[in-house]
Structure formats: structure tokens, C-alpha cells
Amino acid sequence: MNKSILGIRNPRILYSTPIELEKKNLSERGRVVLLVKISADSGVSVSIGEKVKTGRKIGYTENRYIFSTITGEVKKISRIEWLNGINYHAVQIERTGDDEWETVFVPSDENPAKSREEILTLLESAGYPVNYFKSERFDRFIINCTEEDVLTSNIQATILEKKDLFTEAVNLAGKLANSEVIVVVQTGFENKIREIYKGEIRSIKPVYPSGMNEILPRALNLEGNIGIIRADLLINMLQTLKTGLPVFERIVTLIGEGNKPLKNILVRIGAPVSEILNKENFEVDSGYKIILGGAMRGRTVFDGDFPVQKNASGIMVQGKKDVVDLTPQPCLNCGECVKVCPQNLQVNMLTRYSEFSIFDRCKELNIADCIECGMCAYVCTSHKPIVQYLQFAKKQLSIIEASKKEISNDK
């Protein structure tokens, strides 16, 4: 990672290249903790002591089902606050033996003739957010094969591990989007993709955050209504259609001391971070930091029981030498945060308004357009926790909007 010197140039932060995928089974024993958001339209559908199979519905939230990712017994149902400040029911399931499967629907291999509408209905029943495909009409549709964060390579590892499914998955996207499809990769990964896919492929420089979904169409100079989906999510969708099972595992990048990517590992969704690290023989001492995600977008975990979620990109362990203890200072108005913002936001002003709870001004300055890439915090000469300020403001605005809606409904 290179920072700018005296504002002469913007920093260049490079994405990682693929590293080894270790296929060791990390879920032979242990437990998972599955989260069900607490809201008016959500709930838990299992009870303590109940036996569940892999794929069993254990709850629902915001019109989507939550499924068990192991076969076992429900041991505990508690309430926790997740890293985003939202409260969840935490359903703890302890493995009792080998996987016994409970399918959501009849797999497509047994009944392959499906229309676009039927496929979307099946995917929705398996917990996938499909309103995107139902409500939009796309001029072009991108399959995003770039990484989500810095130091992670789980997306590319997933593609290579499931390369036999890739072309079929791209064809599925074309059918769902009813549009021409473009596969986009990081420079250096094109040859591996061309070995498994013969359609249109475009590459971008592996410079963060150009591969983020919100930025990629601009990086490719594409105009019109451009749809986009991550390659790993698309492959999961195809696997679900073929097996009738919801997604229950995920490849994540394990990043060790010295901020060094070590390997990619296959873990069950919901597996507590502490159990994964124990099985990988990681000793986490006092003063170490555990981060869910990568170097730029990851969030610090303060409890080893926090589970890996289905959108996790990595698990990062920073040793005492890697953890930099910085004290935030007053803003110097240097403008570095504004200069690097890919969304052209007035980051300095948004941070101040959030700090002093002036949330209406945050809304006026389009804080909703913030994609939380972390570039502003990376270059901040005052070491202010800018991303956390922006996240706080967005959460408070959502609470305010929800309260207004509730009051309006009561009238």
C-alpha cells in the first residue's frame, strides 16, 4: 500500500492475487451461531432442544428465511448486538453428527425445465434477495469477479474451486437479468478465466476500490442501467438450483500477523471465529485484534463467539506489532479525504456533522451515497475514525426515518 506524499498523488492500494485453498473440513465438530434480525417482520421458528438437519428453516427476517448450516441440536437462543449495531436473535446449534440434508425444493437436475419467473421464486424460497432482478431492466449486466477487500482472495478462490460451474452460472445471470452479460476480472486473472469461459471478458487494474459494485460500471465507462452481481453469489445461486439446498458454507481468506494472507479456507456459515482460529492453531493473545473481513472494510470482533456470515470475505488476525494505537486529533481541513472519495462526497463536513449529531445536514450532503470503502480514513492525517462516524450517521438517519414512518402509520 502506497500513500500520497504531500498530496502529490492518490494512494494506490492493490487487490490480492489468488492463494491456496485448503480443503480441510473445519466443521466435523463444533457449533454454529445463526443470526435472525429482531424486527416486526422476523422471528425464530425453532426452540431449544430441537433437532435440526442441514438446510432446515430456523427463522425468517425481512421476507427471507434463515437456514441451519449443520445437523445438530438447538442449544441456546439469545440476543446479541451485531457489529452494525443491529440487534439479532442468536440461535446456537451444536453438531450431533454427519450432515443430514433437508432440501428447500426439488433440485433442477431432477426437474430442469424452469422459466425465469420460476427460478426467481425458487431462489427467493432459499433465502436469496431476488427483488433486484424482478424490479430492474438492465442494458448490460456485469459478473464481478474482483475481490471485495484488500488482502482477501476468496472470490477468485471460489471461482477456481468451482470452475466447472462458472459458464453455466454466467448463463443463469443472463437469463435472470434478460440482458447481455460481461465478465469483469482483475488484471492478471484473465488467463485463468479464459480457460473456463469463452464469452466477453473485461479487465480492470487491481487497484482498490475500483472493483466495488458501486464503482465498477464507472471504471468500465459503461452507461445506461447496469446490473451487477458478485461471482461467488451467482455460483451459490446455481448450486442451490442444482441441489435444492440453501448456501451453508463459504470460502474466506485467513490473514495472519504482519497482515499476510496465508490461505483460503472453507468454513460453515455461522461458525464462531474463535473455533475457526483454534482449528487453524492460531493463538490469539491479549493485545491482538481480530477483524472480520479484509484490511479496508473489515470490522473488529470483540467476542470470539461472533459468527462468520455468508458475505464474509476474510478473517484477519493482527498481532501486537500490527495494531497501531492512534489518538484522533481535530480535523486539519487538509482535504485528503475529499480528494480520495470515489463518490465525490464532502467527507470532512459529513464527519463533523455526524460527530455533532447534525444528521439532517448529513442527509442533505448525500451521505447515503457513501459506500464505506475506507479510503477517507486511510489518508486522514488526523487519524479520525471517519468510516465509523459515517456509519453512525446513516444508522441514526434510518432510525429517524423509521420513527417518522411509524408515526405516519399511526395517524
Image (cartoon, rainbow, N blue to C red):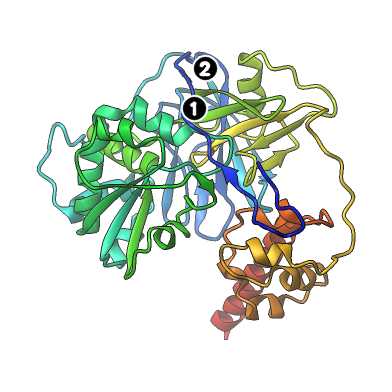
Q: Quadrant of residue 235?
A: top left
Q: Find out whether the residues at labels 2 and 1 contact each other: C-beta distance under 8 Å.
A: yes
Q: Quadrant of the N terminus?
A: top right
- Give whichever of discs 2 and 1 has the lower sequence position: 2
Q: Residue at x 9, y 43 (%)?
A: 113
Residue 183: x %, y % from top left: 30, 47
Residue extending farthest to the front is 8
**Residue at mark 2:** 26
Q: Residue at x 68, y 67 (%)?
A: 338
**Residue at mark 1:** 268
Q: Amino acid at mark 1?
A: Arg
Q: CA distance from mark 2 to mark 1?
A: 8 Å
Q: Residues within 10 Å of mark 2 (few under 14, many from 20)?
A: some
Secondary structure under badge 1? strand
Residue 9: x %, y % from top left: 66, 57
Residue 47: x %, y % from top left: 54, 35
Secondary structure under badge 2? loop
Residue 231: x %, y % from top left: 36, 42
Q: Residues within 10 Å of mark 1 (few under 14, many from 20)?
A: many
Compared with residue 328, is residue 1 higher up or lower down, i.e. above or below? above
* Residue 135, numbered circle: none
Q: Amino acid at mark 2?
A: Leu
